[in-house]
Image: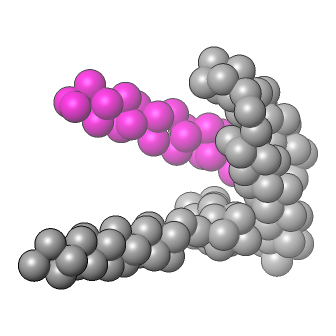
Amino acid sequence: MRKLISILAFIALISTQLNAQKAKESPEQRAAKQTEWMKQELNLTNEQLPKVAAINLKFVNIGKEIRNSNLDEAQTKAKLKEVNRQRLQELKQVLTPEQWDKFRALLKEKNQKQKQNQNQK
């Protein structure tokens, strides 16, 4: 009986880990989601789309490297903040002033919702 319980526990652990791995998006998938969201919200042109996609992929990969590094939480947060600042600078060069203003407003709204969700926890 103990063997059976141990085997079932082991199978449950493995299946949980496999599901967690499936749930994680690849950098390409995450960048594609970001780009698609921006395309819909900002009405990106055919000329802007590949530029925005390249920027998003570049910075998703950089962010992944930072998260996988041996930095402590504060260092990681500081690095990610700097990387995000660089990403925004590059995006600003591609977007029109109207798109940029709308993008900043959408980000502000998204950040406020995240803060509200954190406060509710």
Compare residues 85 and 4 and report the one nearer the observer. 4
Res 28 quadrant in image: bottom right
Residue 23 lies, in percent from the top left, at 47, 70
* Magenta stretch contains residue 96: yes
In the image, residue 119 sits, relative to residue 22, either above or below, namely above
Taken as a whole, is the magenta stretch helix, strand or loop? helix
* Magenta stretch contains residue 103: yes
Compare residues 106 and 2 and report the one nearer the observer. 2
- Seen as rendered, the residue at the extreme left is 1
Res 66 quadrant in image: top right
Count of numbered tags: 0
Residue at image location 43% in from the left, 68% down from the top: 17
Residue 90 falls left or right of residue 22: right
Quarter of the image containing the C terminus?
Answer: top left
Compare residues 26 and 102 and report the one nearer the observer. 26
Residue at image location 21% in from the left, 77% down from the top: 3
In this picture the colour scheme is one colour
Residue 33 lies, in percent from the top left, at 60, 68
Residue range highlighted in magenta: 95-121
Residue at image location 10% in from the left, 79% down from the top: 1
In the image, residue 102 sits, relative to residue 11, either above or below, namely above
Residue 29 lies, in percent from the top left, at 65, 72
Residue 86 showing in the rendered view:
yes
Residue 13 falls left or right of residue 95: left
Compare residues 74 and 69 and report the one nearer the observer. 69
Residue 7 lies, in percent from the top left, at 27, 78
Residue 92 showing in the rendered view:
no
